[in-house]
Image (cartoon, rainbow, N blue to C red):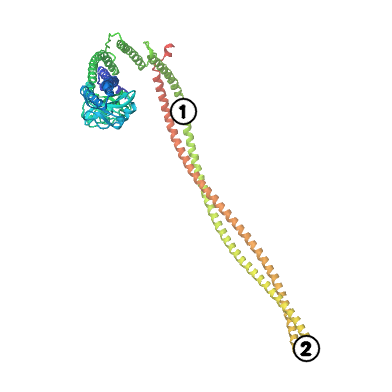
Amino acid sequence: MSRQHTGSQPARKRRSLNRRILGHTTRNILAVVFLCCVIMGVSMQSLANNILLDSLQPMVRQSAKTVEANIHMLADRMMTIAGDTRMRSTGDLSAAQASRAGLLTEAAEIYELHTIALYDLDGRLMQGIDGAPEHLADDFLALLQETDNMTTHPSTIFQGKLGVTMGMPVKQDGETVFYVVGVYKYDALDDVLSSINIGKHGLAYMVNREGVVVGHPNQALPLRGETLDQLTNSHEEVRRRVISNETGASEFGMGLDTMLVAYAPIRGTQWSLVLQMPKSDYNYLINAAMVSDILITLAVLVISIVLVLRLARSISRPVKHVTGRMVALSNGDLHTEVIVTESRDELEVLTRTLDSTVDRMNQYISDIQQVLTQIAGGNLDVSSQVEYQGDFTLIQQSLRTIIQSMNETILGFRSAASRLSQMAEELNGQSNQLHHASLEQNQSTEALAGEVVHVQEQLASVTQSSSQTRAKTEEIAQRVQEANQQMDSLTSAMDNISANAQEINMIAKAIEDVAFQTGILAINASIEAARAGTAGRGFAVVAGEVKDLAARSAEAAKSATEVVSRTRSIIQTGVELTAQTAESVQAISGVSGQISAISDQLVTAVQGQKAALSIIETRIGEITDIADRNLQNAGESEQASALLAREASALQAKVEQFTLKEEQET
């Protein structure tokens, strides 16, 4: 089965080596390229994301400084207004008010203010242009009072319009006397926010500490109170860090896109600047770089596959020739020439080694054929003429061992054939003796069988006599058993008579006692009658009669007692005789039982002898059969010994045909 499997393997294995090399190499390269592209894509995305977040932080800080500069410019204007000498006019009240009104009007025109006004320390309007609120907001007033310096309102909504509200204390002799509050137009902040360009869709906006948008390129958002949560998709981390006045950058998802956001506080205000842009604005650059890398990688892959294909062909062609030659070799072809590859590498070594292997196998097989041909011709004085190398020396050693073993075997056959011939002659003589012994054994067995039949007839008569004896013994035992029963009845009757005599004796004693008592009574009655005199004469006569009756009763009782005593002695004698008779009958019953047991044992013994004789008869039959078979086997053995002698002679003649080394040496 293994040869068939090996032979069918090349026919079933159709894939060429270069295709396998190319396929495995291409799959490995594609796997490596795919893995590298995935790693590169993830790395580039992560790197670009980190670069964008890192670059947004300095950008938002710089933009916050720009907003701070504009806020400071507006603050400087308010400080200029608050520091104007016309604010501190010490003339009469009307002149001071007129001077301040001119200053406020002039400042509103020059600095593009929605309104500007003066408020006392309680936040009540003192003087201002049209549109100034009558009272400052409590939170803004609190900030002014707390800082006692330049303050910016957290909200940018003023009377439905966008503006930056700023307040500045006006001091006189180092003390704050009132506050000047102006609302700048929103254009100052809008220009700054609109000038911050971040990508294609990025924008900058400002939020206060409550997360409310106070500045946005789209002015509608701060006007309707848009919040940071709405612009960042309720991203908690961004909201927390922005309202806590931190600087940093983060990312969050919004719909199908990812947003990048950076934030920094605007110093001097309660605002923070937020830069927000979609990540997709820069993804096209990353994607373009990845596509370029993939195209370059594919080009390198194609070049690598071409080089691998050339290398695979240079390897597969010689290997194909070697494989074909090895397949032919496995099918028994030892004559086809091996094509040697001149490549100065392992392929050349492989082909040259295969060529030398085929040559050596031809030599070995020719030598083995020559040796086996000589052995087939009966010449065991032959040896190998080729020097085997490597593991093939085992074949040479095996040939030598086989030849030596065959020489020893043939020599053994010769001596065995000679001994076998002698043993056949001896066996023939012993077979004749065995045949005669078997005849005598058969005759003795037949005589023994006749004797056994005679013994069986005698045992049959003994068995019949034993059966009759046993029947009579059983009849005697039955009679003895009936006598025992009658003796038991007689003993019981005697016991009853003895018991009745005892009762009669007791009755006689009772009568004697009554007679004695009656006599005493009669004497007493006579005495009493004598005492009575004539009156007691009749009673005395009766007493005399009673006394006589008592005497006769006593005599009768005494006579009955004597009769009973004699009867009891007679009964006692009968009881003793009955007991002796019962013991004799019991002894007879025991002897009868022993005779019955002996008869049973005799019958059992006779039956055992009959069974043993039956077994002996069966064994004698078997011995007779064995003797018959022995007689038959002895005849067959005699014939076989003669045949064995003839075969031993033929074997010896065949063995003599071989030429052995010992014969050549002699």
Q: Tell me if residue 520 comes above or below residue 34 in the rendering.
A: below
Within-10-Å neighbours for mark 2: few <14, some 14–19, many 20+: few
**Judging from the image, what secondary structure is the residue with disc 1 in?**
helix
Tell me the quadrant of the picture where the N terminus can be found.
top left
Within-10-Å neighbours for mark 1: few <14, some 14–19, many 20+: many
User: Residue 550 has which mark?
Assistant: none
Q: Residue at x 43, y 28 (%)?
A: 641
- In front: 1, or 87? 87
User: Which picture quadrant has residue 663?
Assistant: top left
Q: Is residue 570 left or right of residue 205?
A: right
**Judging from the image, what secondary structure is the residue with disc 2 in?**
helix
Q: Is residue 619 left or right of residue 6?
A: right
Could you tell me how far apart the alpha carbons at marks 1 and 2 are, in whole angstroms?
Answer: 149 Å
Residue type, label 1: Leu
- Expressed as whole percent of the image width and height from the top left, the position of residue 621 reads 47, 42
User: Which picture quadrant has residue 305?
Assistant: top left
- Expressed as whole percent of the image width and height from the top left, the position of residue 473 reads 57, 58
- In front: 242, or 570? 242
Query: Closer to us: mark 1 or mark 2?
Result: 2
Q: Tell me if residue 486 comes above or below residue 509 in the rendering.
A: above
Q: Residue at x 67, y 67 (%)?
A: 575
Which residue was labeled with disc 1?
A: 427
Tell me the quadrant of the picture where the C terminus can be found.
top left
User: Residue 532 has which mark?
Assistant: 2
The residue most toward the bottom is: 534
Residue type, label 2: Ala
- Expressed as whole percent of the image width and height from the top left, the position of residue 555 reads 74, 79
- In front: 152, or 234? 152
